[in-house]
Amino acid sequence: MGCTTILIGKAASYDGSTIIARNEDSPGGVFEPKKMHVVMPTEQPRTYTATASHLTIELPEEPMRYTSVPDALAGHGIWAAAGINAANVAMTATETITSNERVLGADPLVVYRPARGVQGEEGYEPERPGGIGEEDMVTLVLPYIRSAREGVKRLGALLERYGTYEMNGIAFSDVDEIWWLETVGGHHWIAKRVPDDVYVTMPNQLGIDSFDLTDAEGAQREHMASADLRTWMAERHLDLTLATSAVGFSRAERTDVADVFNPRHAFGSHSDSDHVYNTPRAWYMQRCLNPSDRWDGPGATYGPESDDIPWSRVPERKLTIEDVKYVLSAHYQGTPYDPYGKAGTTATRGMYRPIGINRNGQLAVLQIRPSCPESSRSVQWMAFGSNVFNALVPLYTNVEAAPAYLENTTERVTSESFYWANRIIAALADARFNDNATHIEQYAEKIGWMGHAMLHATDACVAELPDKDVPAVLEQANEQMAEDLKRETETLLGQVLRTTSLAMRNAFALSD
């Protein structure tokens, strides 16, 4: 499943917030309806069974309330995707990532195997549950953690015990820290703290490019990992580091694992498909956020197919919510690779997989704000549908219910649902992209400033209130924001419908 992630440390963000954000994209040919939902403790299961892997796990007795963005249609699991809990801890899961044959052979994925034969007859083998995966992780972890570090430790323990059937990257944040965890094979994992002054770009590849095993095995200031990672890597010859502390010894003569190594080399991939599907997205995001670097031509430091694009960068200026939305909506604007552009050729336009793609399902931008009291600290910015044609709306998370406009997604296609309204707008606007671009830009800008204004006004309103009175005010602010959002979205739908209708091919110059 394709997704794109950006993480922004608190010293790199415009207001000192930690910000983690991810596009959740459906597989090719699939459009999975999504909704926003608040999971109350009474709703959280105490025994959880995964739909995909048939694994059953007993859960703790005292879950916290948390927001989520689950699949709207029942029948194939929760897929909670992203949210913030009552302790102001955020989680987004997962970014599907890549690996290689050496890793998967050394620690195979834990894949569900159905029963074989007939029960009671010779040769019968009962089903074998698989591990945990994207369907499960937010539900299994977010209600039970009180810091980003705790999130890493809880998920790491679950991975070591039950394994996983896929390679994934998961982000956790609190008001002070962001941590990024990557699964490595069936049971192993690594996690790294995002430095405060950087942003991280993740385009469906294993991303961490430097890892300190000594720290992971000791103080764990910036790194954590499976307890046996060093031994496992040594036994399976996974470390590809050339440098040694012993002068004169070749890599072939080494039997240890470097204290600091490159996980991309050890655990990741550098395939031809990466150069079409993955690396161009990291290239474009960093091109936007560090524009003074040379990104084009023979002398470019990095190109769209470079295998060494950094995992993290210090930006040229502090980054905003609008920067997050722009890069996670990108379709290579200003380059020969823009499918809507006029530069390049037919061969180059559409050459690389866009970030803002037709099968974006939802974008959740999770912001933990240090300048606000704990009772109103967390905001979940939401967009549904293809990001090229939508807008981000902020919603407070210390509430007991999400606005109906964002939660009422069903199988029925209707403009009364924010998800379906965005899908309809995108399909109509795409057909006449240049004619509709101004409508889309004005809509996104208006929702953006209305959202910031709502936050400023509501923050001021609740600043002096007792904590017990804050949730009701936040919930009312969310409802008013959703009402304004619905009005503006319906206006945009009317504009796009008219513009595209006027350009229909069965039009004729003469009229009655």
Image: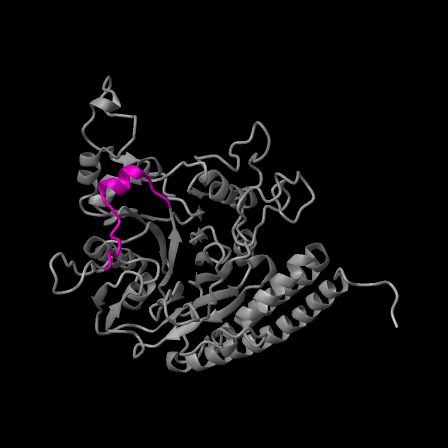
Expressed as whole percent of the image width and height from the top left, the position of residue 83 reads: 39, 65
In the rendered image of this protein, does residue 337 appear above or below residue 50?
A: above
Expressed as whole percent of the image width and height from the top left, the position of residue 259 reads: 24, 35
Image quadrant in which the N terminus is located: bottom left
Image quadrant in which the C terminus is located: bottom right
Left or right of 512: which side holds 35?
left
Left or right of 59: which side holds 409?
right
Residue 456 at least partly seen: no
- Viewer-nearest residue: 393 or 32: 32
In the rendered image of this protein, does residue 341 appear above or below residue 309?
A: below
The residue segment tinted magenta is 98-114
Left or right of 140: which side holds 286?
right
Q: Which residue corresponds to the image point at 32% horizontal and 51% vertical from the top-left?
A: 166
Residue 430 at least partly seen: yes
> Is residue 109 inside the magenta stretch?
yes
**Residue at the top extreme of this rendering:** 248
Q: Which residue corresponds to the image point at 50% horizontal and 56% vertical from the top-left?
A: 29
Expressed as whole percent of the image width and height from the top left, the position of residue 97 reads: 38, 47
In the rendered image of this protein, does residue 479 appear above or below residue 220?
A: below
- Viewer-nearest residue: 337 or 248: 337
Q: Which residue corresponds to the image point at 62% horizontal and 41% vertical from the top-left?
A: 335
**Which coloring applies here?**
one colour
> Is residue 207 inside the magenta stretch?
no
The rendered magenta stretch, by its main secondary structure, is classed as: loop
Expressed as whole percent of the image width and height from the top left, the position of residue 299 reads: 56, 27
| Image-quadrant location for residue 84 | bottom left
